[in-house]
Image: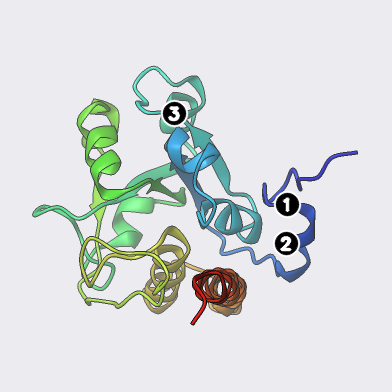
């Protein structure tokens, strides 16, 4: 009998699937997940993001120029692909002319799900991603992922990036304004609370073992 959930990839006793409230943002999210994130990261938020966003996909690889599924999506004329990535030439949702660019195509957002170091490597090794128009945040959002050390104050987890991007795209009139993206943050907060409990228990046990 399996002891792991094969949707969220967590142990069955801490499975988060019951907390997932799927939403359809009317745009397609594709999470480009580094293998380290996919198989070794216990608190990774990419899978929770994928389970929450209807129609999203997860592609696991380290480079994507020769990844068949990535190239299939890039060559699909019904989509307008962009990548969420900080860059000096990146566009902001409040100023980008989506109407002129989309032309009845569905917006496709690639999200790189990896540490910042691996994210840079994945981009540098994938020319087809480098050529895509980039989106970035003009506001400096702050992460609530306090249990995980972030490389900078404005660094966001994958699930937080999805949340803030959806909210910005709703304002821009690209994303369905009737959906509530809070379902992303709700499951994220539950995950943080659970992990905080584990940390506190470990600290308590360690303190007891040390003795007076």
Query: Which residue is identified by label 2?
Result: 14
Please say whether residue 131 is visible from this viewpoint: no
Q: Which mark is residue 11?
A: 1
Could you classify mark 2 by the number of other residues whose Cα lies within 10 Å: few (under 14), some (14-19), or many (20 or more)?
Answer: few
Q: Position of residue 13 (x, y in %)?
A: 79, 60
Helix, strand or loop at mark 3 = loop
Q: Where is residue 189, by image quadrant?
A: bottom right
Q: Nearer the viewer, residue 38 or 175?
A: 38
For discs 2 and 3, the disc positioned in front in the rendered view? 2
Circle 1 sits in a helix, a strand or a loop, which is it? loop
Instruction: Give the residue at mark 3.
Output: 61
Q: How is the image coloured?
A: rainbow
| Direction from residue 2 to residue 56 in the image, left or right | left
Q: Which numbered disc flags the more N-terminal residue, 1 or 3?
A: 1
Do residues under tags 1 and 2 come within 8 Å of each other at their CB atoms? yes
Q: Secondary structure at mark 2?
A: helix
Q: Is residue 72 left or right of residue 94?
A: right
Mark 1: give few (<14), some (14-19) or many (20+) Cα within 10 Å. few
Neighbour class for label 3 at 10 Å: few (<14), some, many (≥20)?
some
In the image as oriented, which residue stretches furthest toward the top? 66
Q: CA distance from mark 2 to mark 3?
A: 27 Å
């Amino acid at each position: 009998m399996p002891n792991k959930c094969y949707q969220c990839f967590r142990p069955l006793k801490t499975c988060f699937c019951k907390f997932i409230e799927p939403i359809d943002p009317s745009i397609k999210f594709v999470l480009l997940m580094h293998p380290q994130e996919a198989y070794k990261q216990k608190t990774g938020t990419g899978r929770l993001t994928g389970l929450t966003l209807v129609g999203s996909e997860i592609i696991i690889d380290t480079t994507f120029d020769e990844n068949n599924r990535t190239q299939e999506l890039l060559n699909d004329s019904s989509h307008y692909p962009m990548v969420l990535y900080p860059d000096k030439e990146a566009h902001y949702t409040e100023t980008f002319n989506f109407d002129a660019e989309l032309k009845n195509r569905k917006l496709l957002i690639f999200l790189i799900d990896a540490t910042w170091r691996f994210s840079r490597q994945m981009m540098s090794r994938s020319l087809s991603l480098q050529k895509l128009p980039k989106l970035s945040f003009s506001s400096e959002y702050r992460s609530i992922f306090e249990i995980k050390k972030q490389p900078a104050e404005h660094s966001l987890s994958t699930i937080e990036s999805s949340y803030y991007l959806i909210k910005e795209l709703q304002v821009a009139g690209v994303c369905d304004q009737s959906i509530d993206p809070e379902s992303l943050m709700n499951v994220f907060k539950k995950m943080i609370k659970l992990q905080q409990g584990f940390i506190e228990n470990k600290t308590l046990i360690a303190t007891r073992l040390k003795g007076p």
